[in-house]
Image (spheres, rainbow, N blue to C red):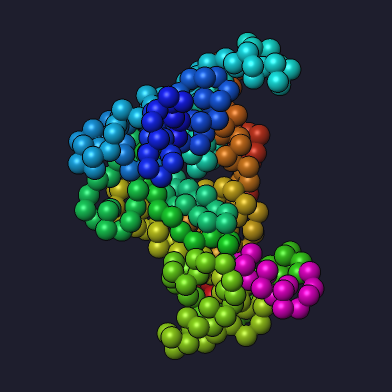
Amino acid sequence: MLTGTDTPRCRDGFRPADQALLVPDLVGYWLTGIAATEVTNASTTGLLDPRTRTWDTDLLSRLDFPGSILAPLIEPGTRLGSLLPTVAAELRAPTSIEVVAVGSHDTASAVVAIPSTSDEVAYIRSGTWSLVGVELSSPVLTPEARTANFTNAGGVDGRTRFLKNVSGLWLLSESIRTWEAQSGDRISLPTLIAEAAAVREPVTTFDASDERFIDPGDIPSRIAEWCAEHTATPPATRAEFVRSILESLAEAYATTLRQATTLSGQHVEAVHIVGGGSENALLCQLTANRTGLTVLAGPTEATAIGNILIQARAQRIVTGSLESLRALVAQAFPPTRYLPESSSS
């Protein structure tokens, strides 16, 4: 929020805002002095009309929200402006340096860097948390989509990211944190994943979206608690816990992808996994097994790559459509391919 210095204070000591900016846009304002709101991040506020990609004035009126404090919307790739002289002096940089708006929602930039030129693909941005969805030319505004808790987030070049938030590798990292605290030993993640891959007996698949798994803490105990409530056999070893976590995530991915394709009507031939989860070979293979689709993993740093590509296109260093940019990504960062196997635990 930006406030005027001469604006009278409220009773709580704060001044009413003259302008509302999201964090990426605030950084742009500090650098250039220009207040604008990039549309992919604006779409996460719930105040944007997903059909027109403009502020929803009817909704703002119903909420009694002062739309006058919202900055003008800009699309990714907009050349926002040059560095302010004071900023340039502090950075010892020329004032000719331009600031370019990118897909400032990190997943918007990550989706730019999916290494595929086909539109018959789904994507999973897999990390601490996961976002699972498909890219569409228009939003899906059905009651069924709302009930299933899908969102129509803004994408680059007018695309819609029809997606749903899913749990992620938070479950694994919190489990490791718990075990290390209990034992006082450092745990090797590669060794743990290898041991989980070697588990041959079926393990319980739990509901990774259960709210008990959201907060930090002892995730293994919560998994055992879930198993007890559902008369399921709890994992007995660390390797079995890890296998259960990854199987459960893969099943959550598969379920969400089936929902996305059913609700959107989008045909999907392959799934791209980007982000840190793309480096987890076991998770990628289990996702292929449970979706029955080819999984293409990588790049890990998709958000940074997509960000750079939109800046480069704005400066005419590269040209073309999103598909052209993605072809460059596929050449520079060939994905690792995982084919479905006949069975999964």
Image check: 56 left or right of 108? left
Q: Quadrant of the C terminus?
A: bottom right
Q: Position of residue 43 (x, y in %)?
A: 37, 38
Q: Residue at x 42, y 24 (%)?
A: 6
Q: Position of residue 117 (x, y in %)?
A: 49, 35
Type of secondary structure dominating the magenta stretch = helix
Residue 326 visible in image: no
* Residue 335, above or below 99: below
* Residue 101, above or below 22: above
* Residue 175, above or below 104: below
Q: Quadrant of the N terminus?
A: top left
Q: Residue at x 64, y 58 (%)?
A: 280
Q: Nearer the viewer, residue 340 or 46?
A: 46
Q: Nearer the viewer, residue 283 or 220?
A: 220
Residue 148 visible in image: yes
Indicate yes or no whether the magenta region holds residue 93: no
Q: Position of residue 259 (x, y in %)?
A: 34, 57
* Residue 181, above or below 40: below
Q: Position of residue 284 (x, y in %)?
A: 58, 58
Indicate yes or no whether the magenta region holds residue 179: yes
Q: Residue at x 57, y 47 (%)?
A: 274
Q: Quadrant of residue 169?
A: bottom right
Q: How many marks?
A: 0
Q: Residue at x 31, y 36 (%)?
A: 48
Q: Which residues are magenta?
A: 172-186
